[in-house]
Image (cartoon, grey):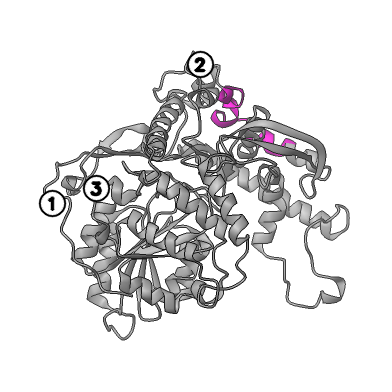
Amino acid sequence: MGGKTPGHDPIANGRAGHVVHSGRNGVVKPQEEDSPHGLYKHPFHESFEETPMMVAVITYMGYGVLTLFGYLRDFLRSWGIEHCCNATERQEQKDFVPLYQDFENFYTRNVYMRLRDNWNRPLCSVPGACFDIVERVSDDYNWNFRFTGNVLHGVINMGSYNYLGFAENKGPCIEAAADVTQQYGVGVCSTRQEIGNLDKHEELEELTAKFLGVEAAMVFGMGFATNSMNIPALVKKGCLILSDELNHVSLVLGARLSGATIRVFKHNNMKSLEQLLREAIVNGQPRTHRPWKKILIIVEGIYSMEGSIVHLPEVVVLKRKYKAYLYLDEAHSIGAVGPTGRGVVDYFDMDPRDVDIMMGTFTKSFGAAGGYIGGSKALVDFLRAKSHSAAYATSMSPPVAQQIISSMKCIMGEDGTTIGLDRIRKLLRNTHYFRQGLRNLGFVIYGNDDSPVVPLLIYLPAKTGAFGREMLKKRIGVVVVGFPATPIIESRARFCVSASHTREMLDTLSKREGIVHPRRTSERERVSSCSCTSSFCSVHHIICTGSSFICLELHQHHRIM
């Protein structure tokens, strides 16, 4: 795995910062008195408003209605009264152990299918600041879709992770990728360990290590597999993984495949993490009480469903104190935060050597595909020999590698321009502008002020689907998310801000004229007092009113049945 490289404390002489978070009802409170304020060099503000009790109760009631009607519909299907479109066992397999009949399948049949039209929408253009969507309709309540032949042009893209706008079909990056395609072709048809190791891969790895400020780096063809296939190579039985409760599923899968013991700490809660570290040191392994072979802390830079940023300075303090290793997933933060776009390490002005394993993906800010792991040369050499991805996965496509090289050089300024730096700065301006616009409209949003991932709370499942449909009618493409990807009472719409967005595009979503005062109002007041001209306001009642929810549920169930 490679030993830790001791490094100086980059924040030992820094100015004390200011750490705040928003509690219930939006009241801003300073963090606990024992928090290490001196670790933060600039204000660090995150907002997480608790779900109001009335909204939580109505949401649970709504899921109860969905469940009740789901069982009713399953009963009707079992008697042949309602046509069954879902996957079921064949008649000759009726005595077998059920393959499909479980609660997850029940949820898919009776909840997900009602909202399915909000996902998997087919695009027919570059997913840049705007895109085109092929129109489709369903005649059987989202079980099947058919294309109408129409195309929805100019839909504002607020769902893609195109943070720096490199998902484009013109410019120097795409021209370089096209030239490499002519020279190398598209496929490699081999693994890195066999004959799939190209000079482009070597060039990309050297550039990635330089960009991250580490000794070495290794790249992989798939971002998800970078986590799920490499964590098992780093830890095994007898090791302990301490994982943030909101870590991405790729991290969770990798941890489970490793065979190591997994313990979960509360999101960004350093007291919870330190308590687990103390218990691990004092008690050791279960039954034998032998010391753990390794203790690995796994966190993300930006959490993709919360928009929060890891409290990295505090995590590093604990990691040093208890001699643990740190695995940092910068899938959403690399390129998106920090003065030079180098992720949360750059954002907090820390030494890259403070992080033992630096992971990230090229699928967001670089407009490409794949992932990387960076760190000490010993770590990377170990992964080249032990990683499942290196041994069994086809290596990265040459034009994809070139796209990453070109965009990374642009970010670093090695292309002789300031385009990359300008995009980083514009992304931060757009993020602040958009977040403030939503707050002024009275919406509840989560996350850090500097995070381009902007979750807008909707809470109620039926309104989640309605919100996505109404926004598409306004030519705005958003991602709506609900349970089980989020807590059951915290369904939301997730916006991803991009440097490619113009101020006019953002104003289309949150116009500044006639907006509600940003004070905290009741749900009913937010509707009755709003005179906003924003595109949101035509669906403002979908989010803000709760009393009509049960009626909406019953109406939609009646329409389906």
Which residue lies under the disc numbered 3? 349
Estimate how packed mark 1 is, as few (under 14), some (14 to 19) or many (20 or more) residues with alpha carbons within 10 Å: few
Quadrant of the image occupied by residue 185: bottom right
Q: Nearer the viewer, mark 1 or mark 2?
A: 1
- In the rendered view, does 94 fall on the left or right side of 177? right
Mark identifier at residue 113: none
Position of residue 407 relative to residue 506, above or below, is: below
Position of residue 239 relative to residue 226, above or below, is: below
Outermost bottom residue = 288
Circle 2: residue type? Ser
Which residue lies under the disc numbered 1? 12
Which region is colored magenta? 535-555
Look at 44% across and 65% down and name the residue there. Answer: 202
User: Of residues 136 and 343, which is closer to you in this image?
Assistant: 343
Q: Is residue 308 visible?
A: no
Distance in Å between CA atoms under marks 1 and 2: 50 Å
Q: Nearer the viewer, mark 1 or mark 3?
A: 3
Quadrant of the rendering where the N terminus is positioned: bottom left
Q: Secondary structure at mark 1?
A: loop
Which residue lies under the disc numbered 2? 529
Circle 3: residue type? Asp
Q: Where does the image place residue 68, in percent across and percent down from the top left?
A: 69, 50
User: Of residues 155 and 187, which is closer to you in this image?
Assistant: 187
Look at 38% across and 61% down and name the residue there. Answer: 206
User: Of residues 119 and 178, which is closer to you in this image?
Assistant: 178
Look at 69% across and 58% down and name the residue there. Answer: 106
Q: Secondary structure at mark 3?
A: loop
Q: Earlier in the sequence, mark 1 or mark 2?
A: 1
Q: Nearer the viewer, mark 2 or mark 3?
A: 3
Magenta stretch: includes residue 338: no
